[in-house]
Amino acid sequence: MTQISAQLVKQLREMTDAGMMDCKKALVETNGDIDKAVEYLREKGLSKAAKKADRIASEGVISIKVDANFHKAVMLEINSETDFVAKNDRFKELVEKTSSLLEDMPVVSLENLQKVSIEGMAYEEYLKTQIAKIGENIVVRRIIGITSPKNSIVNGYVHSNGRVGVLICISCNHQQNTQACIELARNICMHAAAMKPQVLDYKSFEMDFIQKEKIALIAELEKENQELKRLGKPLKHIPRYISKLEINHEILKNQENIFKEELRKQGKPEAIWDKILPGQIERFMADNTLIDQRLTLLGQFFVMDDKKTIAQVLEQKSKELNDDVKILDYVRFELGEGIEKKVENFAQEVATQMK
């Protein structure tokens, strides 16, 4: 049998927030494969999500520049080794100068940034001089630029701690309506910063992903229902579907027929069915698109009006402007996402420094 170390159990617990014994059992069942152990816990309903923040070691800042006309925006992540340096005035100046360089570049990319001239030298050399002065390794990890096409605007938002940034591009059919979408774009950026949608909409998902998520989501809900039943509270609905990707016209038509049959049995006059059915279909969609509500921007309920999804907010804006308001592009950076934390032994580190 594979030997499971306490460090591995601790790591899995930090990633999943599952119980210590559950983590150990998962690792035993998966022969110490931590990725398979995460999936095992999710399928058993013992893990709600991997807690990425606990695995992130990098410090630094997310920076955004949006031009005055809201036609172009750039976002970058610059990493430092420590939070102390990230708050240093020299580091802040480096971030500001780099952001300004990107704002003026016709094509935004890491490769182009390295070649651009600043203070009489290539940026690549300039960065080395700053690293020498600051005394810590600094990396421009990623950058992105969005130039809004015709009849559209781009706006952005960086959270006050500088660790999360979002860019969103919104389009209309008529140029005169784009200015009315500037504040809406920023508000949706703020929503995305807080709610962490992974993709714009359900069309970004693959069916294999949805099937795996369904197993995990149903296990999670069933686990929660066990506790709710014990407490004598209403149980959560176990959905047949979890994404619009699974729901086609035929499924909706069949569901509408089921609702009509229920209304007939209840003795509701057919003359009022058209007033009742839209609300029932809307509720059906809300109950059966839970993964869209968790992971897609358009499927999430808006933090500033939790009765409407972002998609419905856009529909409302379209009616107000007599236009077709759409999100063309959505990008979200979170500081250090995907960079795993280096395991440190504090006592060993001190001992090493004392040598």
Image (tube, rainbow, N blue to C red):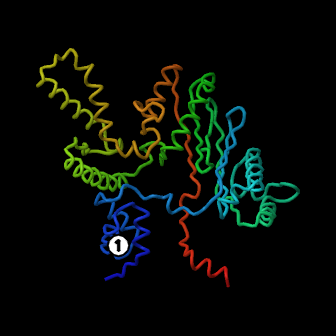
Crowd class of label 1 (few under 14; some 14 to 19; many from 20; radius 10 Å): many
Query: Against 97, is 43 above or below?
Result: below
Look at the image and tell me in which quarter the C terminus lies. bottom right
| Left or right relative to 226: residue 116 | right
Amino acid carrying label 1: it is Leu
Q: Position of residue 52 (x, y in %)?
A: 48, 58
| Left or right relative to 314: residue 169 | right
Q: Quadrant of residue 25?
A: bottom left
Q: Position of residue 245 (x, y in %)?
A: 36, 44
The residue located at (39%, 42%) in the rendering is 293
- Which residue is situated farthest in the bottom direction here? 355
Query: Against 255, is 354 above or below?
Result: below
- Which residue is situated farthest in the right direction here? 120
Residue at the disc numbered 1: 27
Q: Nearer the viewer, residue 105 or 307?
A: 307
Disc 1, SS: helix
The residue located at (34%, 81%) in the rendering is 2
| Left or right relative to 13: residue 268 | left
- Which residue is situated farthest in the top direction here? 271
Q: Position of residue 257 (x, y in %)?
A: 19, 30
